[in-house]
Image (cartoon, grey):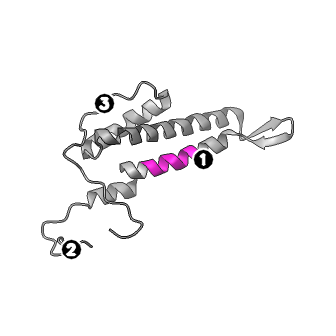
Amino acid sequence: MARGRKPAIKATAEGIGKAPPAPAWLPPEAKSEWRRVWPGLAARKTITTQDLAALEAYCLAVGTARRAQAAITQDGDIIKTEYGPKRHPSFQTLFQSMTEARRLAAELGLTPASRHKAGSAAPQENDDLADLDL
């Protein structure tokens, strides 16, 4: 594996094929994301019980971003304060949540690039170079 590259995401025998219910402690927006991503994860069988905490964190980050965006939409981009107009404080939460969600999505194989990597992880039968680690 080249320096700086993540290992390919592969299906595993321990992969969960049936979606467990979303944890009760997740907020509604996070539970919605859990239900949205599980069909693809279950089909690829890349998630094991050890990975559920990362999935919970991903869903929580997405849910937090959705709530922050809802607050910005409701209140407006700029709010009035005693010191004058300021950017809505939820922007900080929004950007941090989106960054974390994007990082975890890549780890879980939820981005186009990581899904492509997962799909190309198995060597082709007629590939003469398959036994080389290229």
Between discs 1 and 3, the one toward the N terminus? 3
Amino acid type shown at disc 3: Pro
Q: Based on the displayed image, in which of its 4 quarters is residue 72 positioned?
A: top right
Horizontal and vertical percent for residue 39? 31, 38
Is label 1 or label 2 in front?
A: 2
Horizontal and vertical percent for residue 116? 33, 58
Residue 88 visible in the snapshot: yes
Between discs 1 and 2, the one toward the N terminus? 1
- What residue does disc 1 label? 95
- What residue does disc 2 label? 132
Give the dominant element type of the magenta stretch: helix, strand or loop: helix
Amino acid type shown at disc 2: Leu
Distance between the alpha carbons at the discs numbered 2 and 3: 38 Å
Residue 29 left/right relative to 121: right
Residue 55 left/right relative to 14: right
* Extreme residue toward the left, this view: 126
* Callout 1: SS: helix
User: Relative to 122, is 109 above or below?
Assistant: above
Please name the residue shown 47% across and 33% down the image.
Answer: 30
Please name the residue shown 36% across and 51% down the image.
Answer: 109
Bounds of the magenta segment = 95-104
User: Relative to 35, is 24 above or below?
Assistant: above
Mark 1 surroundings within 10 Å by alpha-carbon count, few (fewer than 14), some (14 through 19), many (20 or more)? some
* Callout 3: SS: loop
* Callout 2: SS: loop
* Extreme residue toward the top, this view: 24
Tell me, for residue 20, which label it has, or none.
Answer: 3
Residue 115 left/right relative to 15: right
Distance between the alpha carbons at the discs numbered 1 and 2: 41 Å
